[in-house]
Image (cartoon, rainbow, N blue to C red):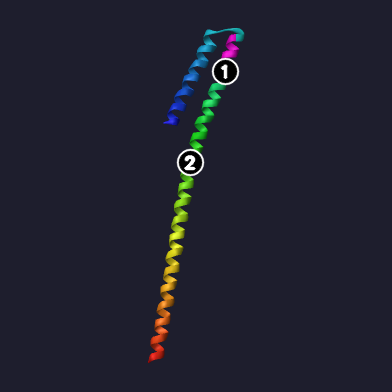
Amino acid sequence: MKQLLSILLTLIIFVMTFYVYSNFTGKLALLGMFFCGLLLGIFLMIFVLNVKNQRLNSYKRELEKESINSTESSSRVKVLEAKIEVLEKALEKKIKEK
């Protein structure tokens, strides 16, 4: 939604720039062009920063999922190692009994 709004405002300011350029002359046109360009730059940067923030947030979520998966798999490995130790001890005990 923010991206759509930013693109819309950028297009409106772009149209305003042409309006100012075609309807005003002299210093007023120069001043109008300056402010339209300034607003255009601001809204374009807002759009670019929103896109980068969305990509960064999705990358962070992906890293969190990977860390959860790696933590989960390391926990599984520890549990399996503990089970193996218990089975090894039980096997040794049975061998000694025979």
Answer with mark 2 or mark 1, whichever residue precedes in sequence.
1
Percent across and percent down for residue 5 are: 44, 27
Secondary structure, mark 2, is helix
Q: Is residue 62 above or below residue 5?
A: below
Quarter placement of the N terminus: top left
Disc 2: CA contacts within 10 A as few (<14), some (14-19) or many (>=20): few
Q: Residue at x 50, y 38 (%)?
A: 53
Percent across and percent down for residue 7 are: 46, 26
Question: What kind of residue is marked 1?
Answer: Phe
Using the image, tell me which numbered label, if any, was put on residue 66: none
Q: Residue at x 44, y 72 (%)?
A: 81
**Bounds of the magenta segment:** 28-32
Disc 2 target residue = 55
Q: Is residue 16 above or below residue 50?
A: above
Disc 1 target residue = 35
Percent across and percent down for residue 41 are: 55, 25
Of residue 82 and residue 54, the one placed in the foreground of this image is 82
